[in-house]
């Protein structure tokens, strides 16, 4: 039983990690907290839902579509809107992101109505047993894909020219400008990648969980929790943060009941912020 | 009761940043009414030492006494209220407030803030404004000041606090000759008011002309102490400042 | 001075409105504006004057609302006593939460406050005393229908007047100057002898107190409260947007913001039943892009600089 709870937590935690990866990237590189992150995850989920319902495209395959569409959306939003205030005080960008979130959520409400939807794939319920633990295939595949995407991002950031430019910009903005990096483009690419990751997370979410236009808010907050637990500036952070949240939530809801899910995650958030604001991996206090 | 001739003393202060020992077991005394110079090459630990003295950083060991009371471990605001003021090398004005308001905040707080009404605080700020030669900038926002005026504002803010001791951290850096002379004069006058001064400075002309004594830091260690004459002709000190080039010259 | 005189006369005219109209809908709408004026002005104390942009101020509103409701329905205390106790509880909570959280800066402070607000909402949803998600009923006011509208209008107006009076005194005194100093440079303020922790906590508590009073009024006015609407993050967003819109760190700015934003909201929701929140999103985006320094700044500068004002605003903050 304990092992089952642990495995459930780990599987969900992998997805949480992917959810937070994009937020953590954008925050680390551009010093923007993207409140609209959850809304982007929601769009990704609906892209998968629509493709599956109207064209029958397998949800795992739709990963490619959701992430590339979301990249374009993110790139455009950064270029056209956020970039205009990126140097203003941070709560200005925060409020702007809230504005974007409100817009997206309500647009989705009008288009899709508040109904809860499900992506009903034929293999959705199949699972296998190991050491007395039941593991649904879709959850395992989603978990592995989440990890794989994280690894791909890691290679992108360390091995490609764009990836290195992004890292250089995040470490030393002025230096990057001096060495000829076009910061506005780098920021747009970063934001695009961040939202593409949100889109991918949305797809995986849609395969496992029901979706609704208002699902974004709580996912944004979960992404915060994961980002804060893992700390900024490393690829490993979101993975560790995601797994931690997944496991704690899994045991916590088992002990206290599912209604306590959000209370548990917000309590973790606040406690970590007070005692280790740089995350459990980060060194010391803020 | 006879007043202790030493107003501030530090014993065995140490600060490490990771593997780097920025300040290593430093002791010194600041005498009442004196101007004590603190020099040393870039990165030798001068600012870090002031941060330890003013409570902005915590020393790993040692003691700090002000008027015979231990002030080590006190938060900066307590040290500010007790009568020890400091400037910041990278100036920290209140950018969106006027110059007068910047100074008035010092007068409302610091050592005598509790005794002063708002009106009194502002009239003291006016005096300090005059004293430091900032009168023309009184109503401008601090963010619009020139470099020279910003440095002066740092001094003015500490003066308004009615302190007994002030640490000046490179208040002359970036000033031209005329401005340096004016600031030197101001520091002289501050001493005449009975305030004891510890001044960090790279401008040797100023150091030579107004300090009573100097001590020198190098890689966090105190390598010399004495009158300006003695210290500035000390071969260790010259070597520290000129580094490798000097060693080659000797060879 | 002239500007203040104008504003004060507008306020006086405003305060007489229950005598000038018998339209209860209008009075109710004006009362809503007043409630948001209290909330935005309270936010302005911590966010505008002190420079700590709280993204969780709705928690004080919610705590005020719930405390008032629980006191009135469980202990039989009257409205005014309950409301004031609600404000005090909210202020104490602000103090308690502020001590650890006000050490954080920037994004970390913003997220921590947001987190606390969400955590308290989740707690309220799960506690017995708050009746979880089913909500709490309050005893109805014993008045005539018209009387009720006038009653709430004036209670809110008095609380707002008190808040403005207090703020205007504070910000002419040491307390206010020290808060501004903390906003402008906390290290320097600290070294100058300002106990920043105490000052920040006091500002946060004051903000919490008045937000709590607003919550109490709201609860009694509604007669029934539930966690979701009372702790809705959108309320915090509105407080911030109103403060920014009216001009941060100014006395009357939040009132101008509250009036404008609520009027726009009301207008939109009467024309677009479903889409009005969507338009609110657009309003926020446009405001941040074109008027990040508030309406007052626009009025002052647009005469001098014309449309280049907007271009300059954008040039200043882009990369
Ligand atoms: N907060 C910090 N974290 C890590 N290292 C630091 C920190 N502050 C200072 N240092 C390091 O400690 C050493 C001493 O720095 P400090 O600023 O005290 O030198 P300084 O003598 O004031 O130099 P300067 O003349 O350039 O002002 C330097 O090597 C510096 O890089
Ligand atoms: Mg220095």
Image (tube, rainbow, N blue to C red):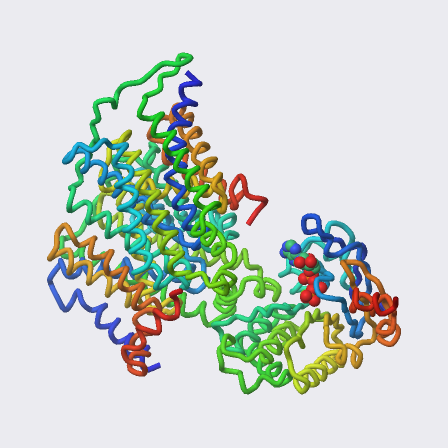
In the depicted view, which residue is nearer to us: C272 or C267? C272
Q: Is residue C109 visible?
A: no
Please tell me whether residue B76 is drawn above or below residue B154 in the rendered image: above
Name the one closer to the observer, B124 or A110: A110
- Image coordinates of residue A17 in percent, x first then y, are 41, 37
As displayed, is residue B169 above or below residue A194? Answer: below
Residue pictured at 49% horizontal, 49% vertical: C101
Left or right? Give the position of B16 relative to A115: right
- Quadrant into which the N terminus of chain A falls: top left
The residue sitting at the top extreme is A132
Count of marks overlaid on the render: 0
Camera-nearest residue between B206 and B67: B206
Task: Work out whether residue C152 can be spotted.
Answer: yes
Residue at 87% across / 74% down in the picture?
B233
Q: Quadrant of residue A89?
A: bottom left
| Above or below, comparing residue A209 to residue A37 in the picture | above
Question: Percent x, y for residue C181?
Answer: 52, 67
In this rendering, the answer to whether C77 lies above or below B220 is above
**Residue C115, x across and y down, in percent:** 40, 44
Query: Which one is in front, B250 or B52?
Result: B250
Q: In the displayed structure, does residue C152 sit left or right of residue B206?
A: left
Image spot of residue B117 (x, y percent): 56, 74
Q: Is residue B141 left or right of residue C287?
A: right
The reply, left or right, for residue C224 in relation to residue B112 is left
Q: Quadrant of residue C40?
A: bottom left
**Residue A92: which quarter of the image?**
bottom left
């Amino acid at each position: 039983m304990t092992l089952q709870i642990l495995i459930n937590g780990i599987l969900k935690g992998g997805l949480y990690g992917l959810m937070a990866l994009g937020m953590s990237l954008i925050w680390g590189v551009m010093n923007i907290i993207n409140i609209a992150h959850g809304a982007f995850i929601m769009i990704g989920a609906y892209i998968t839902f629509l493709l599956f319902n109207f064209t029958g495209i397998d949800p795992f395959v739709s990963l490619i579509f959701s992430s590339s569409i979301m990249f374009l959306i993110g790139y455009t939003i950064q270029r056209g809107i956020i970039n205009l205030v990126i140097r203003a005080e941070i709560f200005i960008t925060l409020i702007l992101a809230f504005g974007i979130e409100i817009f997206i959520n309500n647009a989705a409400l009008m288009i899709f109505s508040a109904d809860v939807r499900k992506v009903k794939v034929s293999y959705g319920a199949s699972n296998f047993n190991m050491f007395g633990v039941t593991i649904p295939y879709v959850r395992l595949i989603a978990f592995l894909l989440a990890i794989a995407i994280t690894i791909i991002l890691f290679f992108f950031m360390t091995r490609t020219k764009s990836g290195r430019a992004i890292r250089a910009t995040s470490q030393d903005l002025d230096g990057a400008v001096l060495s000829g990096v076009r910061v506005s483009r780098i920021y747009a690419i970063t934001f695009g990648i961040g939202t593409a990751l949100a889109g991918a997370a949305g797809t995986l979410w849609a395969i496992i969980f029901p979706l609704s236009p208002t699902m974004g808010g709580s996912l944004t907050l979960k992404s915060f929790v994961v980002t804060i637990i893992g700390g900024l500036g490393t690829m490993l952070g979101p993975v560790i943060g995601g797994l931690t949240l997944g496991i704690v939530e899994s045991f916590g809801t088992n002990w206290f009941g599912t209604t306590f899910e959000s209370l548990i995650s917000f309590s973790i958030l606040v406690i970590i912020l007070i005692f280790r604001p740089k995350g459990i991996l980060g060194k010391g206090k803020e | 009761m006879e007043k202790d001739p030493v107003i501030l003393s530090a014993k065995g202060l140490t600060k490490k940043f990771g593997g780097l020992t920025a300040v290593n077991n430093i002791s010194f005394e600041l005498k009442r009414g004196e101007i004590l110079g603190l020099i040393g090459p870039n990165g030798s630990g001068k600012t870090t030492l002031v941060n330890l003295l003013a409570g902005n950083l915590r020393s790993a060991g040692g003691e700090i006494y002000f008027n015979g009371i231990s002030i080590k471990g006190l938060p900066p605001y307590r040290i500010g209220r007790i009568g020890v003021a400091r400037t910041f090398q990278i100036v920290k004005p209140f950018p969106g407030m006027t110059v007068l308001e910047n100074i008035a905040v010092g007068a409302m707080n610091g050592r005598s803030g509790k005794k002063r009404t708002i009106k009194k605080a502002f009239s003291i700020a006016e005096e300090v404004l005059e004293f430091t030669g900032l009168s023309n900038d009184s109503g401008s926002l601090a963010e619009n000041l020139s470099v020279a005026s910003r440095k002066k504002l740092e001094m003015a803010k500490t003066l308004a606090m009615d302190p007994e001791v002030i640490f000046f951290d490179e208040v002359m850096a970036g000033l031209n000759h005329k401005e340096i002379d004016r600031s030197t004069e101001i520091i002289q006058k501050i001493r005449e008011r009975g305030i004891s001064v510890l001044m960090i400075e790279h401008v040797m002309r100023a150091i030579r002309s107004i300090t009573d004594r100097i001590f020198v830091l190098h890689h966090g260690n105190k390598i010399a102490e004495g009158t300006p004459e003695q210290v500035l002709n000390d071969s260790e000190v010259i070597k520290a400042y000129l580094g490798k080039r000097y060693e080659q010259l000797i060879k | 001075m002239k500007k203040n005189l104008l504003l004060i006369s507008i306020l006086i005219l405003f305060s007489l409105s229950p005598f000038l109209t018998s339209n209860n809908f209008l009075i109710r709408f004006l009362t809503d504006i007043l409630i948001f004026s209290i909330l935005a002005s309270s936010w302005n104390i911590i966010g505008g004057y002190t420079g700590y942009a709280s993204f969780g101020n709705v928690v004080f509103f919610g705590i005020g609302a719930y405390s008032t409701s629980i006191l009135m329905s469980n202990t039989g205390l009257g409205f005014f006593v309950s409301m004031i106790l609600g404000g005090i509880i909210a202020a104490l909570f602000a103090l308690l939460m502020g001590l650890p959280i006000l050490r954080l800066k920037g994004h970390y402070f913003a997220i921590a406050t947001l987190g606390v607000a969400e955590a308290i909402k989740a707690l309220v949803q799960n506690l017995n005393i708050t009746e979880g998600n089913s909500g709490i009923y309050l005893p109805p006011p014993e008045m005539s229908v018209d009387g009720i509208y006038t009653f709430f209008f004036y209670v809110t107006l008095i609380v707002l007047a008190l808040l403005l009076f207090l703020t205007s005194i504070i910000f002419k005194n040491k307390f206010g100057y020290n808060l501004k100093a903390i906003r402008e440079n906390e290290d320097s303020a600290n070294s100058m002898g300002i106990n920043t922790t105490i000052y920040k906590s006091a500002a946060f508590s004051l903000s919490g107190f008045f937000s709590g009073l607003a919550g109490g009024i709201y609860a009694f006015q509604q007669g029934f409260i539930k966690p979701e609407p009372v702790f809705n993050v959108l309320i915090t967003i509105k407080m911030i947007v109103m403060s920014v819109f009216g001009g941060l760190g100014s006395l009357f700015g939040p009132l101008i913001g509250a009036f404008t934003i609520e009027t726009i909201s009301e207008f939109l929701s009467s024309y677009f039943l479903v889409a009005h929140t969507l338009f609110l999103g657009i309003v926020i985006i446009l405001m941040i892009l074109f008027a990040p320094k508030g309406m007052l700044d626009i009025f002052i500068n647009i005469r001098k600089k014309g449309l280049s004002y907007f271009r300059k605003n954008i040039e200043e903050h882009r990369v």
